[in-house]
Image (cartoon, rainbow, N blue to C red):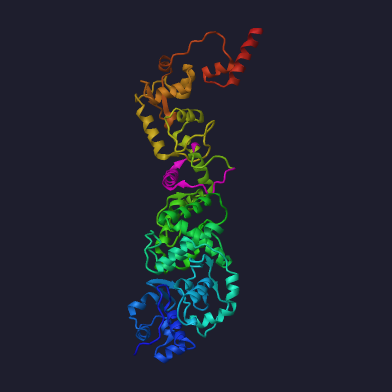
Amino acid sequence: MSRLSLTVPLHSDETLTSYCSRTAAANGLPSATVFATHLGFSFRRLANGNPADVNTFGEAVGLQYDNLRHALIVRDNMQLTIAGESVPQMHLQRQRLRFCPHCILEDETTRAGRSRARAYARLNWSVTFIRTCPIHRTKLVTSDKTSFNAVHDFVVRLQWERPKMAAHLLNSKAQETTKFEAYIADRLVGRASGLELLDEMPLYAAAQMTEWVGAAAIHGPRFKLEDITAEQWHEAGKEGFEIMSHGEAGFRSFLEPLCTNYSTGQGSVGPRAVFGRIYSTLKTRQNDPAYDRVREIVREVAVDRLPYGPGDDVFGPISSRKWHTFITAARAHQLTCAQVQTLFRAQGLLPRSSRDRQTRILVDAQEAEKLLADTKDSVSSAEARRILNVSAIHFWQIVKGGYLRPLLAIKKGGNCGAVPFFTRMELERFRDDLRKRITVQEASPWLAPIERASRKAHRPTKDVIGLLLEGKLKTVACSGSEHGYAALLVDPAEIRRKIQRKKRDTDRMTAGAIARELNAKTGTVAALVDHVISVRLR
């Protein structure tokens, strides 16, 4: 094919369809389609980057395929490629003319050549992520008119807009170019930005994630796509780029507060509720590997900051757990929420005040799992007393003395009631300790159980228990008619010798002091005193 004698220059930021359309206008033809037919190629296939049609057109204008490559838009089904960057069809405006009226005016007044062939379509104008002319700092205009005729023919479509061009210039809206738009423009011409995460993703995925993150940051995580206007998308891109340009750290800094809000929120706690539109949109694109890394980050943050574990799904089943709430712990261990909540409170994992919102307080999973595993092999204080065969008074003296260690901390001013907080292993250890205290095999008649021996010796019970459990009594036997703690027999005389009575400054004592001294009830002492007085008065 012979080269055309009349051609126009191809600009570095021009689309190939614009170049073909202008060449047709320079040669006096009414449309690019008619021009292509004359030269033996298809303008529609040229618009889709078909190599054969590109080469035919290139021969006509004297340019090799490599010289035209930067201006190509190549179609592959619903995906388009510009300068090696993949862009979905929905983000490339080809049905309507998109342009800057100020650039058109400058082209036509400053460039040489036939008037209809001077203005050209910039590659950036086709990409919907770019909404601003960086030269004139104005919002790009999108034509109202669309037609299947002359779909890619820039000159023809610009001709349709000429009657409105004065109005377009008059109504032009000032708008600053954002760093996000500059980033998209750089990638379209192959300029590297050196941004972690975004550069690792295809252009369309990087751009969409940036806008989604910005929209969520401005309008909340549950924003609706259909409610966001073009102006709001412009601001979303600006805001999102401030976050995403910092790479994985920036994206995590956006996600983590959403997890923090979980502890004070209400309603569902699933990933859709926590991460909102970001999660649901990534979920619908589950089969697109372009979003794999951002999905991994969302998953990592969710597991690190939320009570998710086996049985939960965040872009796939979760196999490990870092946090529990008392609800998730109850579900995992098949306990009631009230049981787990009581255990967590007793262990100090939850505040004791019922006024606090506790359903979303996070508890370390390892600590919770150990507590609940130990609790399954534990008994209540009442059951522990029965197993050890010890009275309540002696039992709590033993616990408070540190001789029997509870699984859960004892509340100040009282015990833990029926909360299971003594492990069977600990009870068995204590029983072994009791058996080790036995020093004689035959029980002498003057030996007595600990409680009775304490009364006979007129010594405080807690001191007697201390002597016994610390191995300081030489004479300790075991009764054959009892078991456990109640079976132990001690010598009251030895106890008197071991525990010296405190010297008193006066011979007078209160009824309470006498009761403590005799290990008796105050009422009993008072009745005894009344009886003695009445006898003396007779």
Residue 164: quarter of image = bottom right
Residue at the spot 37% in from the left edge and 72% down from the top edge: 84
Q: Is residue 512 above or below residue 213?
A: above
Relative horizontal placement of residue 193, taking residue 457 as reference (left or right): left
Q: Residue furthest right?
A: 538
In this rendered view, identify the residue nearer to me: 355 or 59. Answer: 59
Q: Quadrant of the C terminus?
A: top right
370 is within the stretch colored magenta: yes
| Residue 422 visible | yes
In this rendered view, identify the residue nearer to me: 63 or 515. Answer: 63
Image spot of residue 439 (x, y percent): 34, 24
Image spot of residue 296 (x, y percent): 40, 60
Q: Is residue 456 above or below residue 29?
A: above
Total tally of numbered discs in the picture:
0
Residue at the spot 56% in from the left edge and 76% down from the top edge: 143
In this rendered view, identify the residue nearer to me: 416 or 284. Answer: 284
Residue at the spot 52% in from the left edge and 39% down from the top edge: 418
Image spot of residue 144 (x, y percent): 58, 77
Q: Which residues are magenta?
A: 355-381
295 is within the stretch colored magenta: no
| Residue 307 visible | no
Q: Quadrant of the N terminus?
A: bottom left
